[in-house]
Amino acid sequence: MATHATHHHHRSFLLRFLPFLTLLLLSAADDSDVMLKLLSSLSPAPSGWSSSTPFCNWNSVRCDFTSSFVTAINLSSTGISGTLPPEVNQLSQLQFLALQKNSLTGPLPSFGNMTSLQQIYLDNNGFSSVPNNFLVGLINLQTFSISDNINLGPWEIPTYLTESRNLVAFYASNANITGIIPDIFGSFPNLQNLRLSYNNLTGSLPGSFSGSEIQNLWLNNQRVGLSGRIDVLASMTQLAQVWLHANAFSGAIPDFSNCKNLFDLQLRDNRFTGVLPPSLMNLPKLLNITLQNNKFQGPYPLFPITVSVIMGTTDSFCLDRPGPCDPQVSTLLDVAGALGYPMSLAESWGGNNACQDWRFINCDSLGRNVTIVNMGRQGFSGSISPAFANLTSLKNLVLNDNNLTGMIPPLLTTLPELQIFYVSNNNLSGPIPVFPPSVKFMYDGNLLLGRNDRESSGGGSGGAPGTSPGNGDGSSSRTSGQSNSVGIIAGVIVVVVVFVGVVLFVLYKCYVKRKHKRVGRVEESQRQGNSDHSEIPVFKGGNVMISIQVLRQATNNFSKENVLGRGGFGVVYKGELHGGTKIAVKRMETGATGIKGMKEFQAEIAVLTKVRHRHLVALLGYCINGNERLLVYEYMPQGTLGQHLFQWQELCYQPLTWKQRLIIALDVARGVEYLHSLAQQSFIHRDLKPSNILLSDDMRAKVADFGLVKNAPDGNYSVETRLAGTFGYLAPEYTATGRVTTKVDVYAFGVVLMEIITGRKAVDETVSEERSHLVTWFRMVLINKDNLRKSIDPILDPDDETYESICKVVSLASRCTVRKPTQRPDMGHVVSILGPLAERWKPSKPEEDDAYGMDRHMSLRQRWQADEEITLSAELWRPRTF
Ligand SMILES: Nc1ncnc2c1ncn2[C@@H]1O[C@H](COP(=O)(O)OP(=O)(O)O)[C@@H](O)[C@H]1O
Ligand SMILES: *[C@@H]1O[C@H](CO)[C@@H](O)[C@H](O)[C@H]1NC(C)=O
Ligand SMILES: *[C@@H]1O[C@H](CO)[C@@H](O)[C@H](O)[C@H]1NC(C)=O
Ligand SMILES: *[C@@H]1O[C@H](CO)[C@@H](O)[C@H](O)[C@H]1NC(C)=O
Ligand SMILES: *[C@@H]1O[C@H](CO)[C@@H](O)[C@H](O)[C@H]1NC(C)=O
Ligand SMILES: *[C@@H]1O[C@H](CO)[C@@H](O)[C@H](O)[C@H]1NC(C)=O
Ligand SMILES: *[C@@H]1O[C@H](CO)[C@@H](O)[C@H](O)[C@H]1NC(C)=O
Ligand SMILES: *[C@@H]1O[C@H](CO)[C@@H](O)[C@H](O)[C@H]1NC(C)=O
Ligand SMILES: *[C@@H]1O[C@H](CO)[C@@H](O)[C@H](O)[C@H]1NC(C)=O
């Protein structure tokens, strides 16, 4: 073929390329040169490979019938290192190349034009770069795997891949891919597996996913995050496993009802909003779904018992249990839906009372009915929902200067109280509705509105602002009045039917759920029984009574050497059970501590047996011995955050890095968020401070000391007669009025953040009075931003990136400690701020994926599964190729 081509060329050209041509011809005669080259660049030499034997006899090498050409090489998991010579691409008959799970390094060769190649496995190596035209012209390529090559320089998914029309599987997770997912998926009629997790892909899902046959789609954990809506997935009818978690996807979840094989849908840790479509709860094959850390709205979803669901605490569902939303809330969610569920609404429109601090909404003086909706100049696109017509008390509807399209729903003319309707400067179209004269209707700046209408000139003139009450007897509306009212009646009928249907459906679902719940609970307690330490006898429902003998033995008879610390109500000892489990034993004497100590003991047991979270210190059991009360906790080997912040020099600790501080802060926030958001009974810690934050060997934090925890009476506050807690961390409203809400913890958390930033104690008696109260001092410092650098813990000595991160935490700390409790963020918000900051500093190792938070909606069974999932997904991670 080469000689044929040169016929047409000039002789000098031929001469110039002669060496190259001979090489080509030589190699065409036989693959031995290339194979020898390959052999010499691998070390150690693969077993059975030797220059003294013909290459077709080497282990794991297959040749064609002429014994001149290699067709397959399999060096999978053979412990080889070295590089791949560029000449590999001269193996013209090679169909199968498996080099995965070795220690190969260096640049990858180009596989361009290796038209026989069907399968390439390069995963789990240390290759350093991908050449241009890497996979160009691979017309027979079926499987390509390059996952887990973390040393690769950044590369993009090439668009010429469209030449590989037979592609079945493309595995490239954890391979430093950047750029977008190119819009090339119309070219792969057989593509089933696309795995691109743990890269730095950005942009949105390509339109050509539509109609693709992909079954297994992994796009999770992109560094910056894929974004945009995921509607295109609804048309991918073969989807079975879809991992989208830890990205920046937004918008609502589409109707997946055409994806009948979908069994695993990971949506957590994105920016999804909107009401979950009922079809999601009815997917026939669904087994696993995660939803947490999004901003879902509307009714709390109710999945069949067969589905393992993980829900979050930061969503804006109207209730924390299944059931229909308040009608006014449903109406406004329809409004939000017509706007594509924008994030700004999802963030503020939570709960089941639209009159409670919803952005853009005002209500009547009783706080019952919405009277004003003011969403002007918000950059909203989408349409005006006819559901507005349900807000019968609405007086002002202001939607000007957005990007709204579609028609103005004629039903709006029926709003009895409407006074102002302002939609100027949008892209609305269709007829101009006729409002009663009492309505001031402004609609200029909508070029398409009423274009077929004769009266399109009258922008802003729709009615006099002066009220001409009820009897205007709209002669202008009489022409179209009849058809209008027929429409309205039909609309109302439809609406009523739908409503009744929804109510019946929800009632039915509630009934089913209640039945399931009972079953679930039985499973829970059984599981608990089985999973407890064998050394410790099981006591009622999983709480564990431990004998004093066991504790004496474990703590060397409460010897001095075993003392870990002293708290307000007793001494804490280190101990070790027979099985080697390290414990911390808090020993209190009722004589010494009186009733208060008893109360703490009981409170702590009561709380700790109800809560369980990876960022709360676990209670392993307790013991009552005469006047003694003992609590047994998991042992936290690195002591308290206080020690690491303020006493690291005396105790010979390494000072905490900023990264460690961030992760600790996030851990604590997650623990407290969990306490605050427990479904049945939410708790307030009331004594959050660095000495109650304990650290594990890998410097992950758990919140401890639940002696002061209070039940949060839902939504309300309780008034305390006696103050509890620690000076320096007490929220002002609490000291002033005894009002306790979850915001008391948010305040204390803010103080802890300040301590983390400055390395100074909340109250420091050793300095002058005006500096001794950290919050006051810090606020003063912040008045001039230039002071900030000086107030940061000097040991941190931040570089620019760290400084930027610190500034964000400074601003969070300030917000957490504002005077008015209602202006403080909730812990969910705190988590959502700290999460990305801490994430940025973490290595991108998939095993360390920690976006995972146990939460209120998980039964013990689910928690179990979640623990398993962590190991499981790490395991699944390595593409199982052979
Ligand atoms: N689970 C634990 N693991 C290791 N050390 C602990 C544990 N619990 C408490 N400690 C140590 O014992 C000290 C006293 O604990 P505690 O009585 O809870 O403190 P306080 O009453 O001051 O909040 C702590 O400051 C800590 O150093
Ligand atoms: C490749 O080699 C590995 C290890 O020897 C073996 O497990 C695997 O089955 C081989 N694959 C093929 C397709 O021959
Ligand atoms: C593949 O072949 C084409 C045409 O034969 C040639 O232009 C191109 O350079 C080759 N690409 C590689 C990477 O070898
Ligand atoms: C990926 O590419 C970036 C940009 O060149 C580089 O900084 C990084 O070290 C590469 N590797 C990984 C594992 O991210
Ligand atoms: C990830 O991609 C973004 C946008 O393409 C880029 O700005 C950023 O530097 C990349 N990060 C890494 C670590 O490669
Ligand atoms: C409007 O209200 C009616 C009656 O309360 C209800 O059936 C219907 O679902 C509501 N429509 C919307 C869009 O909220
Ligand atoms: C609030 O709305 C309800 C239902 O639409 C209506 O019955 C009631 O009269 C309204 N209340 C006020 C004060 O307008
Ligand atoms: C308005 O919407 C149109 C069509 O959806 C879009 O092309 C345009 O960019 C939007 N304009 C603004 C200002 O958002
Ligand atoms: C569902 O998730 C659990 C852990 O959360 C895992 O054990 C199980 O294998 C998953 N099921 C499927 C079908 O992926």
Image (cartoon, rainbow, N blue to C red):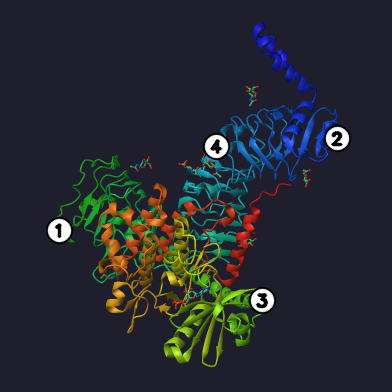
Q: Where is residue 583 in the image (x, y as percent from the top left)?
A: 58, 76
Left/right placement of residue 243 relative to residue 227 reads right
Q: Which amino acid does label 4 sit on?
A: Glu
Which residue does the image show at 63% across and 52% down from the upper left? Answer: 877
**Residue type of the residue flagged with mark 1:** Thr
Q: Mark 4 points at which residue?
A: 156
Tell me which label, 3 or 1, sits earlier in the chain. 1
Question: Which residue was labeled with disc 3?
Answer: 530
Measured in 3D between alpha carbons, the distance from the residue under mark 3 to the one under mark 4, in whole angstroms, is 50 Å
The answer to whether one can see residue 180 in this image is no
- Residue wearing tag 1: 467
Cα distance between the residues tagged 3 and 1: 74 Å
Mark whose residue sits in front, 3 or 1: 3
For mark 4, give the secondary structure.
loop
**Which numbered disc covers residue 57?**
2
Of callouts 2 and 1, the N-terminal one: 2
Residue 639 in the image: above or below residue 83: below
